Amino acid sequence: MHQLTALPFATVSALAFYLVLLAFCFPKMRKSFDAYCKDGDRTQLRGFDFLRGLAASLVALGHAYWFGHPCFDSAARFLPTIDCFAKPVGIFAVLSGFLIYKSVLSIKSIGGLKNYFLKRFFRIYPIYFVSVLICIAFSQYGLLSAAQGVQNLQRDIFMLHILPFSNGANPVYWSLYVEVAFYFALPLLVLGARKRNIVPLSFTLLAFLILLDTGDQYFGLWKFFVCGVIAAEISPKIGRWSLPVFIAGIAMVLYDFGGSSHDWIAALNIGYTHPSLDTLGLAFGTAMLVAALPNLQAVGKVLDLFPLRHLGTISYSIYLMHMLFYLAVFPSLGILKMVQVPCPDALAVGKLPALFLPLVMLPGALFWSLVCFVFVERPGILLGRYLTRGKSRVPDKLPVAPAKVQEPVSV
C-alpha cells in the first residue's frame, strides 16, 4: 500500500487512464478520439500512428527514469536500454520527414501553400501554447531576474528559439523547434526542384549534414528528417523487397539501442559519434522501416488496431506534456532548465518496484496527454481543417511548382 500511495498524483492519474481504456470498449467513445487518424486517406500509411505513439512513449519512459532517480532504478532490470530512450526523438523525426513530405507533394497552388501552413499551425501551436501556460503556472520562468524570465517567456510564446536554436522552459521544446524549421524549409526544397531531382538533392544534403556534424543536437536532428524524405521517395520502388527491408530496419534500430558501443557507422569513421541520440545507424534503420511499411498491408493493419493507433493520435500531447506531469509528481524538480537529479521528492520516496514505471507513471502521463488532446489538440485540428476546407482549390498557380507531381497521400 505504501508503494501505491508514495506518489498519489501518479497513482490517481494512472487509475483514470485505465478507466478511459474501459470506456474505449464503447464504439462511440472511440470515434471521439479519431480526429487526427482519420484526417485524410491513410490506408497507405497504416502503422505510422502507432510508431509515433511508441516513440513518444519511450521518450516519456526515459525521462521518468532519469528525472525520477532513484525511484525507478529497478526498472533498468527489464529495460536495460532505458538510458537510451532519448533515441526515439530521431525516430519521430524520420516519421515526420516521411509524412510531411507526402503532404508537401500535394501543394500545387498558392492556396495549397496557405492550406499547408494553416494546417501545420493549428496542428502544432494550440497545444504548444497551453504547455507554455502550464510552464507559467509551474513557475518555469523564475530564473535569475524578472526581466530574464519575461524574455524567456516571450521567446517561448513566439517560438523565437528557432533563430538561433536554443532550449525553452520545457526540455522537449528543442526538437519541436527543429521540426517547425523543417516545416518551413521542406516546401522550398520540394517546390524549388523538379521531383526527379528530390532524391539526389536529398542524398547530397544528407552527405553535407554528415560531414558538417560536430555533435550539436539541433543540427544533428536534421539528417533524420532528410532520411524520412528519402524513405518516402524510395518506398514505392522497393516492391517485393519490402519485408526483408522492414526486418533489416527493425534489426538496425534495436541494435542501435545497445548504446554508444553499437554505433557501428561511427566506428567506420563515418560521421560524428553521438553517444545517446543522433546515430546514423538509427537514422538509416528507421528510414528502411518506414519505407517498407506502406507496402506491408498485413503488418500495417495489425499496427493500426484502435488501441495502438490511438497511442499515435495523442503522441504530440504525450511529447509536450509528460515532463510537466513529472513536475507535478516531483515538485522539487524546480525549474526544468536548471534541474538537479536526484530531487528531494524522489529521495524521500526511495526506490519503487520495477513495474511502477510502466504501469503507473507512464499511464499517468498518458491520461493527462489524453485530456490535453481532447480539450486542446483535437479542437485545434478540427479548426484548422474547417478553415482550410476548399482552399486547396484556389487556382493561383505557384510559379516554381514542378511540372509533374505524383498523386499525393494526404497526411
Image: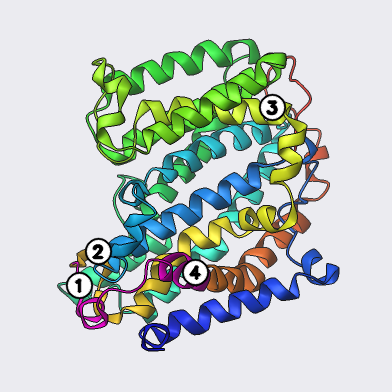
Horizontal side, residue 329 vs residue 142: left or right: right
Gap in Å between the C-alphas at discs 3 and 2?
43 Å
Quarter-wise, where is residue 106 in the image?
Answer: top right
| SS assignment at label 3 | loop
Gap in Å between the C-alphas at discs 2 and 4?
28 Å
Are there few (<14), some (14-19), or many (20+) residues within 10 Å of tag 2?
some
State the mark number for residue 359: 4
Q: 410 or 286: which is nearer to us?
A: 286
| SS assignment at label 1 | loop
Give the mark, 1 or 3, whose residue is nearer the N terminus.
1
Q: Which residue is drawn at 66% across and 71% down?
A: 374
Gap in Å between the C-alphas at discs 4 and 3?
51 Å
The amino acid type found where label 4 is placed reads Leu
Q: Which of marks 1 and 3 is in front?
A: 1
Are there few (<14), some (14-19), or many (20+) residues within 10 Å of tag 1?
some
State the mark number for residue 398: 3
Q: Residue tagged by mark 2?
A: 337
Image quarter in which the C terminus is found:
top right
> Which residue of the protein is positioned furthest toward the left in this rendering?
144
